[in-house]
Amino acid sequence: QQPVPTAFAGTRASPPAPIPPTAAMSEKPIPGWVSFTTSGMGGIFGWLFVHPVNTIGVRMNLSSIQNPGVSLSFVKFSQGQIKANGFADLYSGIGAGIWRQVFYASSRYGLFQVFRDNLAKYRETDLLSRLLAASAAGGCAAYIACPCEVALVRLANDSSYPVADRRNYTGVMNCATRIASEEGVAAFWRGSTPFVTRACLVGATQVATYDQFKTIYAGFGIKGGANVVASSFTAGLVYSVVTMPFESAKNRMASQRTDPATGKLPYTGLVQTLQSVAAKEGPMTLYNGFTPYFMRCGGHTVLMFFMVEELQKQYRARA
């Protein structure tokens, strides 16, 4: 039987061009336990360096409650805190900060890698899939870690109150047991809405953009450690700007006290908190303490992702 002639006889169809691999696609997926473990270790490593800056940021942010309308300088505020209480006081709440990383950092980036790699089975790993995976991972991690966040905010800010108004927690366990006994277990999730909302935004603007910036910078020929630093620093800047108002709302809700005149809490929800602060003190009050917040976010992002990448590289080399 003779072959049927075609208009393209004598030619052979070219195979479709392969899709260029992204940074995430070019790496072999690692087990979930490795993602969680390395993320937690990276989070703790970074937090040891940025905790003092976080303490100053929380105190600057909340100082507007005691000093409404007063513009604060990061340098002068830091000098005043160190002069009044000593540098060691800036490590108040370090225990809660480490526990926060154990639950939050490990869950957030660990779940992101799991979600991203599972989505990659059904669609190309692009910005949208990264945003979806990172937002979902961030929200789940925040809800899990909310008790640690409440303890961290309270321990970091307690010594900035007048002596008569201090809660005088002696450590993270004392703080946790007193919150549970004096205010009820539900108090651990006070401020959970802005924290979870912020965490979803952090996922989208830190974790997902970091993963995307790795691909972008690799396209410019920036690879290795320089790629990690550039990607993480850029991601830290983006997420600091976007999430600062939610950080302010979370700090206020986590540290608030019942109004003795009304017997009610001044802040009852995310939207109410944002509106109340913006109306009474001005919208830019929500950005009080931005400099230390960015130093914390940018610094922690760089240190955490650098450590995570190194740990996972070592695992892949031995696997």
Image (spheres, rainbow, N blue to C red):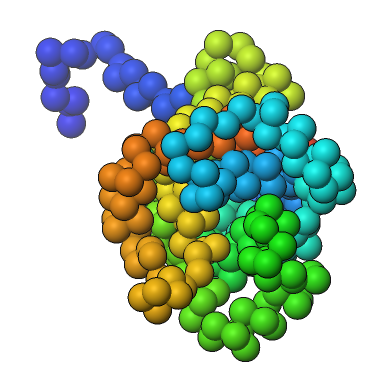
Q: Which of the pair 218/175 is nearer the observer?
A: 175
Q: Is residue 95 above or below residue 229?
A: below
Q: Which of the pair 150/257 is nearer the observer?
A: 257
Q: Pinpoint residue 94: horizontal percent, then vertical percent.
A: 78, 57
Q: Residue at position x 29%, y 55% from top?
A: 271
Asked whether residue 27 appears in the rendered view, the answer is no
* Relative horizontal placement of residue 244, taking residue 168 as reference (left or right): left
* Residue that protrudes farthest toward the bottom in the picture: 181
Q: Pinpoint residue 143: horizontal percent, then vertical percent.
A: 49, 67
Q: Is residue 146 above or below residue 27?
A: below
Q: Residue at position x 28%, y 45% from top?
A: 279
Q: How many marks?
A: 0
Q: Residue at position x 83%, y 39% from top?
A: 83
Q: Pinpoint residue 92: horizontal percent, then vertical percent.
A: 78, 56
Q: Residue at position x 74%, y 24% from top?
A: 225
Q: Is residue 178 above or below residue 5?
A: below
* Relative horizontal placement of residue 4, taking residue 145 as reference (left or right): left
* Relative horizontal placement of residue 192, taking residue 294 as reference (left or right): left
Assign the N terminus to one quadrant of the image.
top left
Q: Is residue 276 above or below residue 67?
A: below
Q: Pinpoint residue 209: horizontal percent, then vertical percent.
A: 48, 33
Q: Which of the pair 127/87 is nearer the observer?
A: 87
Q: Which of the pair 264/247 is nearer the observer?
A: 264
Asked whether residue 283 appears in the rendered view, the answer is yes
